Amino acid sequence: MSLSVKNCNICPRHCNINRNYNNGFCNEQNTIKIAKIIKNFKWEEPCLSDKKGVLAIFFSGCNLRCDYCQNHEISRGQIGKNYSINEFINLIEKEQLDCDAIDLITPTHFSKNLIEAFKKINKKVPVIWNTSSYETTQNIENINNFVDIYLADLKYSNNELGQKFSQCLDYFSYALPAIKKMCELKQDKFDNEIMKQGVIIRHLVLPNYIQNSLNVLDVIKKEFANRKISIMSQFTPNGKSILNRKLNSIEYKTVIRHMEKINLDNGYIQDFESANESFIPKFI
Ligand code: SF4
């Protein structure tokens, strides 16, 4: 069974198209499409996984189009396998028993399907909503019943960089209220230092755009100072972007020093070496 999605306005793109027949900006129709599943994935932030690792589900397509995307084939919806809602329910019910959490990666454009699926799933472990944060507050309210943890990017501190890199005129205008809504809906809860509910705000530092990162940190300090943050150094050039080199250590140190200067110390800093081993991030 697929879900009928007419007049899709799930995300801020507001394509308003009938996804039973057409692809939206996210390049997906009405059926859940998964590009990759990694069981026992251990490379998310340490508080998200105890021993087994998470069940990482990489959805095909994306409602952003970042030219530096590290997962181009996946985000452009070029690869993937279709799952009916029942097939997705079976997948989760079977695999959740062997993981610490279910990690839904770039799931926004399949929100309606996932809401239907999780109404029937007998959830045993937390569900992570791993998002670019280009979301409407309405969608966050809609999915909040089955989501336990928001792993939310804050990519840019203004709309201009979204326009430059992500084909998006209003990234910051939507991401800030979306993250505020996530924080309003989920207080942080831990069991032996493992997060069971809450919000982690992530930021990937981009080469040549250090001022953006400093400004993002200032926004986090002002708006979300008591929430966990995660600063990532793993940027890897994909050969398609003007961002054609890795981060250098001086740039990364500048960002980390600013964190220290403004007393943002509740969270994780990815080891700088991760810039040389993408997809094997270390957090300290
Ligand atoms: S989810 Fe896809 S089709 Fe729907 S509004 Fe967003 S980009 Fe458009």
Image: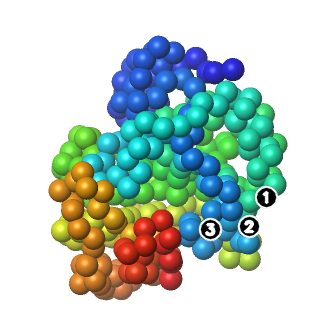
* Quadrant of the image containing the N terminus: top right
- Looking at the rendered structure, the kind of residue marked 1 is Asp
Beta carbon of the mark 3 residue lies under 8 A of ligand 1:
no
Q: For the residue carrying disc 2, how many other residues have a C-alpha within 10 Å: few (<14), some (14-19), or many (20+)?
A: some
Q: Nearer the viewer, residue 147 or 94?
A: 94
- Looking at the rendered structure, the kind of residue marked 3 is Lys
Q: In this view, does 203 lie above or below 184?
A: below
Label 2 close to label 1 by CB (< 8 Å): yes
Gap between marks 2 and 1, in whole Å? 7 Å
Q: Name the residue under label 3.
A: 42
Instruction: State the image coordinates of residue 63 (x, y, percent, origin top left).
Output: 39, 38
Q: For the residue carrying disc 1, how many other residues have a C-alpha within 10 Å: few (<14), some (14-19), or many (20+)?
A: some
Q: Name the residue under label 2.
A: 52
Labels 3 and 2: the sequence-earlier one: 3
Q: What residue lies at 62% left-to-right and 68% top-to-bottom?
A: 42
Label 3 close to label 1 by CB (< 8 Å): no
Does residue 264 appear left or right of residue 226 in this picture? left
Q: Which of 110 and 173 is in front in this view?
A: 110
Residue 142 seen in render: no
Label 3 close to label 2 by CB (< 8 Å): no
Q: Name the residue under label 1.
A: 98
Instruction: State the image coordinates of residue 188 (x, y, percent, origin top left).
Output: 62, 65
